[in-house]
Amino acid sequence: MTRVRYFAAALEATGLDEERRGEQTVGALRAGLVADHPGLAGILSQCAVLVDGSRVDDAASLADAELVDVLPPFAGG
Amino acid sequence: MAPLVEPIAALSERERLRTARHARLPQLGELGQRRLAAAHVAIIGAGGLGSPLVLALASAGVGTLTVIDDDVVEISNLHRQVIHRLSDVGSPKVDSAARVAPELSETRVVPLELRLTPANTADALRGAHLVIDGSDSFDTRAMVASACEQLGVPLVWGTIQAFDAQVTVFWSAPPVGVAPVVLADLHPPESVGELPSCAQVGVMGALCLQVGSLMALEAIKLITGVGESLLGRVLVIDGLRATQRELRVRPARAAALPGAAPRVREVGEAALAGARVLDVREHDEVAAGMIPGAQHLPLAALLADPRAAAGDGEQTVVVCRTGPRAHAAAAALQAVGVDAAVLAGGMLAWDARRQGARA
């Protein structure tokens, strides 16, 4: 299981600070997140999805991943 | 990390007295204060984040602040942009920075009333030891990050939306032994798309002061070499819940993995001949003119149905104002099999070349 944390608008969309997920790849995680949290559908493609700190390809395995962070970009100043 | 700036020989007597409580801090000391006095910091934006940055860094005794903003003060700025006064409405924002700093310290402010473009950003930032981005658009942030990577200077980066904020440090050329982290490792400009502005979603004024203050502290730490910088970490602040969480950020691994999405190519004007040109800016932006023969389709409409924008599969060059939206559009077109590239520098560079040709 991988710990997934949500920030800012992703937190609002899921209603969760974090949860544990069992998907085995980043691509499967993305699909699973949108299925379980429809509010993420519009923003997930913009979000940084960091696997133990790194952006990775959808094919990347989550087998050894401890932490996934989902952070939307914003640009206000 | 080692200090970024060599100290000046001596502080003036007044600066020595004024900054005595800094000198009292064992980590900083009088030596750290002399480093601050020698430092040249460029601040992008004299708005919600730039205002507290100017106050904090001028009172900290930073030697030179280049403050870059091409905007004028509006009355709706005043709930958060704390260097401007009611009487400043209609005046250039950088003028407020130039007024407030000499009232605080011996800091020299260089006001640059300038709209940053791909062509002028690196020149505007050259000479600064460190850059701080408090601008209000991702287009600008992409240009500033790119220029900092080119110059090898650290970039203190903060952004705010509604009650939420992010603060981090990017640096393409940190000291040996420290991993470089750049904007694209967190938010690659081509993935960001359209973001709401403060005018659209609102922004909590008091949070701007907190975030600007944190950014100023990161700058002071890098200049003087004290503490642990946010390079490789992002602070995410939730102002409503009064929580602050930390994310780790490391160089992206995507490019090294098999099967990674192909990167979108950037092409020059020569590639326009014989290609379909697609302008993905908004309606109000194209009113001032497009590349001759270009088709217009705003980014949101294209992303909603990339197949409908695929055309006959001919080579397509996408353009926006500076590049980020065109990258997002080209990536979506590539995903449906279109040979799509991005016009380097966008319409800003296109227009600049036209103006250059006329001059």
Image: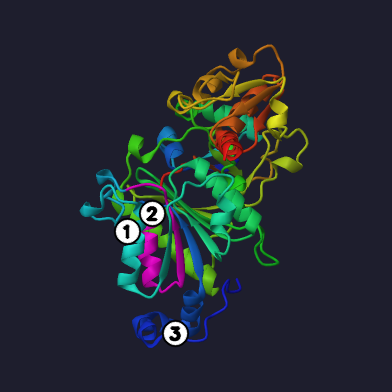
Structural distance between the alpha carbons of marks 3 and 2: 27 Å
Residue bearing the label numbered 1: B96
Instruction: Give the residue furthest to the front.
Output: B359
Residue type at mark 2 is Ala
Residue B186 location in percent, x, y? 58, 46
Question: Disc 1, disc 2: CB below 8 Å?
Answer: yes
Q: Is residue B77 left or right of residue A51?
A: left
For the residue labelled by badge 3, is the local secondary structure a helix, a strand or a loop?
A: loop
Q: Which residues are magenta?
A: B50-72
Magenta region includes residue B48: no
Q: Earlier in the sequence, mark 1 or mark 3?
A: 3
Structural distance between the alpha carbons of marks 1 and 3: 26 Å
Sort mark 3 into few (<14), some (14-19) or many (20+) by Cα contacts within 10 Å: some
Residue A4 location in percent, x, y? 54, 41
Mark whose residue sits in front, 1 or 3: 1
Instruction: Tell me which chain the residue with mark 3 is part of.
Output: B
